[in-house]
Amino acid sequence: MKKQLLFTATLLFATFTTFGQATVLDPMESTPQQVRVADTDYTQNFTSGTFGVAGSGANVAITDAALVNGTISFDVVSSSTDFEASIKFHIRKLYGNSGSVDFTVNGTTDSFSLPSDPAAANLDGYEVFNPLTFSQNVTVSSVPTTITLDVNDIITDAATDAKFRFYNVTFTNVALSVDDFETQETSVKIYPNPAKNGFQIDSNNSIDSVQLYSITGQLLKTFKQEANYDISDLATGVYIANIKTQLGSKTLRIVKE
């Protein structure tokens, strides 16, 4: 899969702990978790280019008069239960540079072409790319998952030097991610919570469907709008309810006693 995209965004960073050599992710976090590569216990092997940390720790940077080529990798683990995550990568190069990168996770590799932009006003300025999205969701568990970036011959091309920056990797728990409603007037609540055999939903908008997931992202039940949602057959634990209305969807956690 090859992509080239441009973006402007404000990046928010969290502080992550490391377990051994792995960066620890929270499986109960519903918002995207951005891991700054410079903060990880990474390993790197750049056969061409000078490697260092830049931007007051915001990125790892590799520069050379002609060519950047090499690999960097780090591990992530879950702090408790397994969870399924989508992954995005944030990188930058100079407008005048060209080359490609490969991202490899759990044996799957996605390739992204990074052509030069000779029409840019400043060929020696840094491009800003849309986050490059990995093609598959990845299971994060207590066993380390290795994230690997291969930089393939980033050359000067139309620029004066070859420069490349790797900022962060964003992990989003697909079972807990929340879609915003289109209006502030929409209200959705689950009760009782914790629940024993069933729960009810209080909403000021008509409910189209309710999908109930395990904490690892497995779809367990699908409901239409009902007076009572039966979960008597489920084991004790935490579940995720994705509630869809005419104005959008919302994801809530529910505890089964």
Image: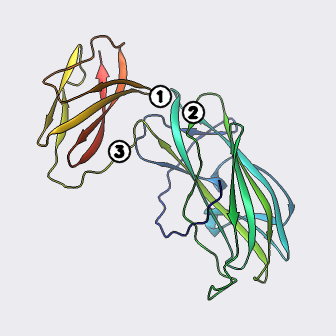
Give the residue displayed 49% in from the left and 61% down from the top.
11
Q: Is residue 42 visible?
A: no
Badge 3: few (under 14), some or many (20 or more) residues near its Cα, within 10 Å? some
Along the line of sight, the residue nearer the viewer: 220 or 93:
220
Callout 3: SS? loop
Residue at the right extreme? 47
Mark closest to the chain's N terminus, 2 or 3: 2
Q: What's the CA distance linking mark 2 and mark 3?
A: 19 Å
Residue bearing mark 3:
178
Q: Which percent across, then down, holds residue 140?
A: 57, 34
Residue bearing mark 1:
216
Amino acid type at mark 2: Thr
Q: Which percent across, then down, holds residue 126?
A: 64, 76
Q: Quadrant of residue 227?
A: top left
Callout 2: SS? strand
Mark closest to the chain's N terminus, 1 or 3: 3
Q: What's the CA distance linking mark 1 and mark 3?
A: 15 Å
Residue bearing mark 2:
139
Amino acid type at mark 3: Val
Where is 93 relative to 145, above or below?
A: below
Badge 1: few (under 14), some or many (20 or more) residues near its Cα, within 10 Å? many
